[in-house]
Amino acid sequence: LANKVLIDDVIDSEKNVVIARAFEPLSKVIVRQLVDLKISKAKVIDTSKDAGIIIKSLKKDPPRNEEEALSCWERITELEPGNAARHMALGELGERLGRTAAAARGFLRAGQLALAGGELENALEFFDRAHRQAPGERSVALLYATALLRKGDATRALQMLEPFTATESDPAFLETLGEALMRSGDLDRARTVLEQLCQGRDDRFERLIELSGHLLKGKRDDQAVEVLGGV
């Protein structure tokens, strides 16, 4: 329990009584109360990462409204960048306040962490919420498309990427776009994209080999040979 501090009031919902106040250290006494009342969750933060500076400042000058609370959550996520729940809370508060940039940032990071943890469905939900907040953000669309491809939904992944095809040409985007086109069956466009990707890059030729396999399956042997000739 060392360095753990509550960041929200803990309330007994049946009696509507505050069990512990926000910014109190999480003690054994509080934990026993939570167990006795069968309260299984409480929001805490590890103050060891900044010697408790942010929590002390919040305790001295607590947020007076949701806008200030949003700023607090942004600082908390900076302290705990690997905590998906914190980023989700930031996203939800930003969404409620109409602060689309903060909401998208929170949901996007929560999605990245869920994807890294193998929680594909949760990641897709977070990426969808981020995309609804910031449909014009290339980084959101690219990460969402990557997750959709993992699920096997190439058509939806391509829809995410299409608005950016005229302006984006970095390797990460082209590789994801090429994969979405291949899996969607648009092999001619896939060839154009992947040949652009592989220009001067020996580390991307496996994508052309993959494309040739799709061409062979489509009985387009001559084109498959042409693609392999460029490898």
Image: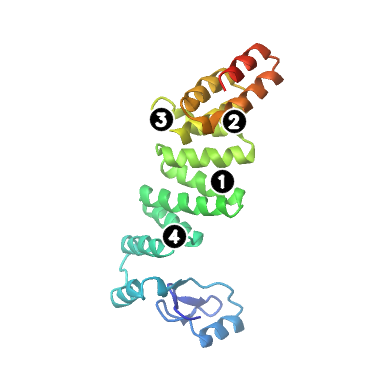
Which residue occupies 56% across, 77% down? Answer: 14
Which callout, 1 or 4, points at the residue further toward the start of the chain? 4
Q: Is residue 25 visible?
A: yes
Q: Does 91 sit left or right of 185 as displayed?
A: left
What is the spatial separation of the Cα atoms under label 2 and label 4, in whole angstroms? 34 Å
- Which residue is nearer to you in this view: 182 or 15? 182
Return the residue at label 4. Answer: 81
Extreme residue in the top direction: 222
Please name the amino acid that badge 2 sits on.
Glu
Which residue occupies 38% across, 61% down? Answer: 78
What is the spatial separation of the Cα atoms under label 1 and label 4, in whole angstroms? 19 Å
Return the residue at label 2. Answer: 206
Please name the amino acid that badge 3 sits on.
Glu
Question: Residue 173, percent across and down?
Answer: 47, 34
Secondary element type, mark 3: loop
Contact, mark 1 vs mark 2 (Cβ under 8 Å) = no
What is the spatial separation of the Cα atoms under label 1 and label 3, in whole angstroms? 23 Å
